Image (tube, grey):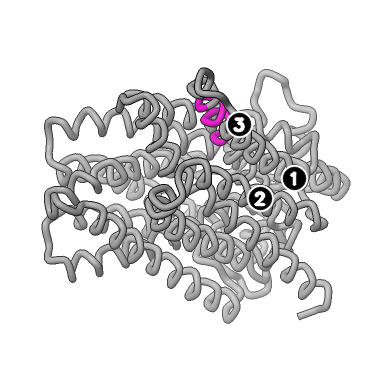
Amino acid sequence: MTRDTAVSERRFRFLVAGYAVSSYGTFLNMVALNLFVYETTGRALAMGLFMAVRLASGFVAGLVVGGLLARFSAKSIMLWANVGQGSVMLVLILAPDSVVTGALMAVSVVIGACGTLFMVALRSSIPEMVGEDRRAWANSLSITGRSLAMVAGFASAGVVVSLVGYTAAFLLDMATFVICAVTVALLPIAGGKGAGSEAGASGAGKGEKEAKSGPRWRPVAFLALAAAPGLGLMVALRGVDAFGSSSHNAALPIYSTSLDASNPAVFVSAFWCVWALGNIGAQQVIQRYTQRTGRTVGALGFGYGTVVMSAAFIAAFAGFPLAVTAVIALIAGAADGLTEVAYTSHLQTLPATLRGHAFGLSATFENLGFGVGMILVAAALDRFSPLAVVGWSHGAAIVVAVVFLLRVAALRRAEPAGPMGRAGGAERVGLRKEEAVEGRPDRGDRDGAEVSRG
């Protein structure tokens, strides 16, 4: 490992630490803000509206973030995303009772939009921060940090609110965003405008030129999908997967209540803790695998992981003994971690000028899938059992995943034999050879970029 690589990895670890802290704040406020909305308004409908506004804001942010990354650096977007979230929490804390409802809506808009902006800026700039060959390691590390933060946020939210109250919880939440903002401000973070300029100077290919000078009526995000056969189906699968995720998130409290009506939070907390252990364990395995082989899990890993994850979530509601359900939750977490690394690493193989747009469009699909899912699932749970609702929701993801796997297999069969054929296929879609092959080209690695070759 060179000195420059060691420095870049140390800086990225520092950034992930700040990201994990702010993620803790995000998951803490998911619980605390929903409770506060219900207590303030006294209506469950208000909680639904709050979540809908938050998801809609993330949806819109996903549409515009690619353009922002073409004009501004990833560092500035990540910095102001945290400043915005911290500032709006301060507004909520200081708001008088007469305007607290309006302040809550402002919080919903800013948190939803800024969360998407930060996530897209981070993921799209990882190749510039740590290097092409360390993408899978960096993705695993950031996902591990977020998973730990999710467990800590969900587990501590009820305790924090009950012991110190909403104001203290919101102050803690604000402090997490300030810490992340300081972390970003202290680091030299590449990506965004700078990365796009470098990519343009290196002449990465036709896809990038079209992103800069193509017809205005044709969104650059769709150019990114069109440049890579199979990538559009991959993003669509991600949206359907988010639709499935809405079902188990909504059904878990209901299922837990049926198991123990006197203390339903126990099963939910235990389920997510075990899920997180599986997710973190998968990240450790992936990091060691990529370090040892120089390869990533690839597009097939994403497809198979989605099938296993969805099947595991369906089985979790089948009424198995608690010990068996714990194993199922562990498998679901591991498969979830696998799919996220494979998916993120794959989108990062796109040229820099297309990458931000693709991640933005992906975030839009995910917010749309989750938002629509929450509406449909909430209505369905009034009439059907949690197992039935989760079954058809995640069943849809399994069907699309099978279609995606068949598509990947077809692309592989159509791929010309030999190293020159593989490299040529990558270059035809506007990727440099080193961008298209995530490991070392001379090893003939088969990875997530393969699906991008026509």
Query: Looking at the rendering, in which quadrant would you find the N terminus?
Result: bottom right
Residue occupying image coordinates x 12% and y 31%:
383
Q: Which amino acid, mark 3? A: Leu
Residue occupying image coordinates x 62% and y 55%:
19
Q: Is residue 330 above or below residue 373?
A: below
Q: Which mark is residue 122?
A: 2
First along the sequence among labels 3 and 2: 3
Q: Which residue is mark 1?
A: 74
Tell me whether circle 1 and circle 3 mark residues in contact (CB < 8 Å): no
Tell me whether circle 2 and circle 1 mark residues in contact (CB < 8 Å): yes
First along the sequence among labels 2 and 1: 1
Q: Is residue 265 above or below residue 31?
A: below
Q: Which amino acid, mark 2? A: Leu
Q: Nearer the viewer, mark 3 or mark 2?
A: 3
Q: Residues within 10 Å of mark 2 (few under 14, many from 20)?
A: many
Residue occupying image coordinates x 65% and y 23%:
218
Residue 185: percent from left, percent from top: 79, 52
